[in-house]
Image (tube, grey):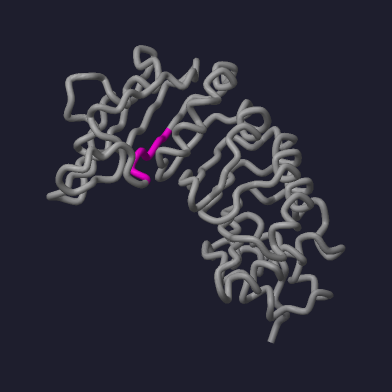
Amino acid sequence: MSKLDQDVFSCILSFIFDSHTIYKILRAIPTTDSFFSLTLHRLCQLPIHLSSDGQSNTASLEIVNLLLSEASSASILHAIRHLILSFGSGSLAPRLPDLFHKTRNLQILDWGDGVGPSANDFDALQKLERLKTLRIDASVERSNWKMDHFANSLGKHLHSLILREVDLDMYRSIEAQSKHFSSYHMLRHLSVDLTGGVWDWDGLGSPQNGASDRFVFANLGFPALTELHLTVGDLTIMGERAGPMDLVDWKPLKELSLTVLLWWVSNFHLIIL
């Protein structure tokens, strides 16, 4: 039987797009084997999901420790383009600044629920000039993001910002940073989900997530947006006022995408070009 060639093995790995499968293969290979670095490199080419939830915490710690070990060359770490993070406090969070410092080609950061970035995280992230897309679980209760640190650091380099499940507290925090957002000349795409929690319910009928049609939205100051995606509750846009369209200067927009959550159906989606 002929020996498996490294080029053939790399070709096989290139057809595997599930990072969990790659990780299982990686654990089966001795670190001294030449196939180990090939597999680790393939893992870094895929979105890497790090989580502190249950069994995922152990695997995530192993991945981070492996990436920060001497077994990982700079070229392997530079292959990382997309990180997906979801965790609370624990042994994983303190390792993140070191990881960010070594992932200089990171392009997409997806920060789910759990603890928001620390000051050290922001210091490391703002040095990643290739980081262009940031997705945030923007519920204050679930993510505890410090928007003042964000607005003064990594935000100015972004091309795309996605804010999921924004609640009223997070909206107020975002609104307070509008003077900093006016300098975001690179940001082209903004996606905001305004359905996190109950905002200004008047106590009549059943409460809906998000704002009522009486809520007054302020312009957030982004000067260069060309694409806007809004997710709102149906009652938020039932009034005669512009409502969430006041968040931006809509005249320069080339694309507006609106998802309306209706109480009697799942949702209604409208794209305006």
Could you tell me which quadrant the C terminus lies in?
top left
Residue at x-position 75% and y-position 55%: 76
- Residue 55: where, in percent of width, then height? 58, 76
Q: Which residues are magenta?
A: 191-196
Residue nearest the observer in this picture, 268 or 233: 233
Farthest residue toward the bottom? 1
Tell me: 94 left or right of 133: right
Residue at x-position 83% and y-position 63%: 69
Residue at x-position 35% and y-position 47%: 197
Residue nearest the observer in this picture, 98 or 119: 119
Tell me: 199 left or right of 31: left
Residue nearest the observer in this picture, 5 or 99: 99
Farthest residue toward the front? 203
Quadrant of res 169: top left
Residue 202 counted in the magenta span: no
| Residue 258 versus residue 87 in the image, above or below | above
- Residue 135: where, in percent of width, then height? 51, 43
Residue nearest the observer in this picture, 129 or 197: 197
Farthest residue toward the left? 264
- Residue 264: where, in percent of width, then height? 12, 50
Tell me: 220 left or right of 111: left
- Residue 2: where, in percent of width, then height? 70, 82
| Residue 202 versus residue 256 in the image, above or below | below
Residue 194 counted in the magenta span: yes
Residue at x-position 71% and y-position 35%: 126
For the image, the number of numbered tags is 0
Could you tell me which quadrant the N terminus lies in?
bottom right
